[in-house]
Amino acid sequence: MDPAAVEGVQAARPAVVLPAFEGPLDLLLHLVRENKVSIWDIPIARICDQYHAVLERMEELDLELAGEFLVTASWLLAIKSRLLLPRPEGEDDDPRAELVERLIEYEKVKRTAAVLAGIEEVRRGIEAVSLEAPEAPSERELDLADVDIIALGQALRALLERHRREHPPAMEVPPMRYSVREKIVELFDLVTRQRSFPLLSHLLTRPERLESVTFLVAALELVRLGSAEMHQRQAFAEIHLTATGTPLAMEALGDV
Amino acid sequence: MSETLRLQALCEAILAVAREPVVAEALAEVAGEGVTVAEVEAALEQVRCKHEAEGSGLVVERVGGGWRLATRAEHEGPLRQFLGLRSRARLSQAGLEVLAIVAYRQPITLPEINFLRGVSSAAVIRTLIDRKLLAVAGRKQVVGTPLLYRTTREFLVHFGLPDLASLPSLEEVEHVAGEGVSGT
Amino acid sequence: MSETLRLQALCEAILAVAREPVVAEALAEVAGEGVTVAEVEAALEQVRCKHEAEGSGLVVERVGGGWRLATRAEHEGPLRQFLGLRSRARLSQAGLEVLAIVAYRQPITLPEINFLRGVSSAAVIRTLIDRKLLAVAGRKQVVGTPLLYRTTREFLVHFGLPDLASLPSLEEVEHVAGEGVSGT
């Protein structure tokens, strides 16, 4: 966090010491201070060059450069070029005025932040006393004054999330993992090799019901295409699938 | 500050934040190099005596081999009264949830709120109506014509909103507050 | 026991269990018939003085709009060791800058904060909201109706401030360390 570290970069210090400027204003303040110039009379050309040099170094080191740095870079260039132009008669607006104003405001912010940091440092060790009460106050109770619309929205989000968990959708449709086409080819192969294939046993021994169903559809398609026949002697008995000798005509298979 | 007084202060501070009785050994361990258990016991005894003086609301007690800081029994009445008073002015987790549901889904009926929360919210609604954050907005034209609830003007004033359309969307809430969804 | 000492003891006992700052009015309400807020304030002041004496591990603080009892900062080390907690994380430079802006200019929108810092502060605000140091105060009625941010009571407690008016004035801040560029 030490902005001064940026000076060390050229001296081939390890890259990690590079600066973390809070933003372009932070960097500009740093440069003004380094150059020991008055903020009321900033030598824009010099500061602008140094600003660009730092940006280049940051880019070389692959630091993530916030867009704001670039926006400010072009702002500086604009101020620089306006300073070079002769100002119209009667106009004495300093092109640097807004820059100065923003730097002064930002410096106040930094000073205040430093004061807050000091207070925080002194108070770090302080813990609220919380003895056991005769009637334990609920930790989850809030003072209404502490509740803002964001807390309200967060409560609803948490609640809807809980509701979703407690009321899962009625039926889950699993993704298709088995293709009928594949099963047709597989089954045709089995039937051709085994002459009479015990389809029912095969279906009942598949580890997954979805696979069984796909097999059954595939078997029906095989019969429809005329490449196989199905036989069952009686209800609930084995279903035999036998090859008819007709080759498999996949192109006749519709969209399955 | 003398070493003895420092040790007394430290013991008192630790008892004040400990959630259960503390044994002297544990205090000696964190009190620093060379502090003996006997010294800690002596310091605790001093703190105990100090609080016996009139004008202290606290007592140091020896319980179950440890020490603890507690409030004086004689203050129990006003203490309970204070905690009761405060809890009436507070918003329970349930209150926050119901307020959030009505704010975003109004007008809405009690059965609908109950469905979302999974528990009955009748008492919570009454409290929120008493506190002028919710109001009745008519009846829903369905079987049983249940009452509909909405948020009030006070609700908008409290949250600094000009109208209900200004409530942040839940996406905006997520964006602003991240996943710190603890409901509190 | 004298009435004054009884009131002191009672105030101390209530602060010890309250878990957050307590307003004198609430104490007066439960302290019994005829006890005025002024008497309560005087009693609290007495308790505060008592704990300033050497050998006390506690302090009475005026923070966040009320009074609270807390441990002394100087016991941080042993206290954390005892509780098995790591030291509380310091706020980042960016976090402190955003708090510094919001504290003095609230309610304020994100674009205004971004402008003052010269860099986007959305992520920082998110962290500060999660740490309960900032809250949303409504929306600004301008194009885009951006959310307005304010500091919370937790902010006041964190920085030991009784109220926002107790923030160091910008003139005071001017005189605080740091070579400025705008001259003194």
Image (cartoon, coloured by chain):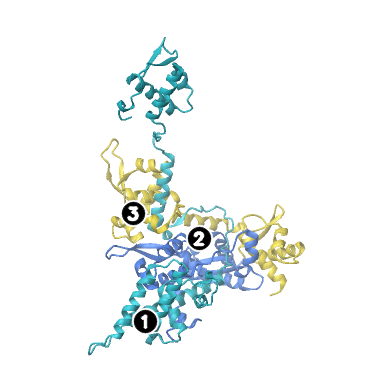
Chain colours: A cyan, B yellow, C blue
- Numbered tag placed on residue A100 in the rendering: 1
The kind of secondary structure element at disc 3 is: loop
Question: Which residue extends farthest left?
Answer: A89
How packed mark 3 is, by other alpha carbons closer than 10 Å (few <14, some 14-19, many 20 or more), is few
| Alpha carbon separation for disc pair 1 and 2 | 56 Å
Asked if the residues shown at circle 3 and circle 2 are in contact, with their CB atoms under 8 angstroms apart, the answer is: no
State the residue at coordinates (45%, 86%): A36
Identify the subunit bearing mark 1: A
- Numbered tag placed on residue C30 in the rendering: 2
Q: Answer yes or no: are tags 1 and 2 on the same subunit.
A: no
Whether residue C36 can be seen here: no
3 or 1: mark nearer the eye = 1
- Residue B106, x across and y down, in percent: 31, 48
Amino acid at dot 2: Val
The kind of secondary structure element at disc 2 is: helix
| Alpha carbon separation for disc pair 3 and 2 | 42 Å
Amino acid at dot 1: Val
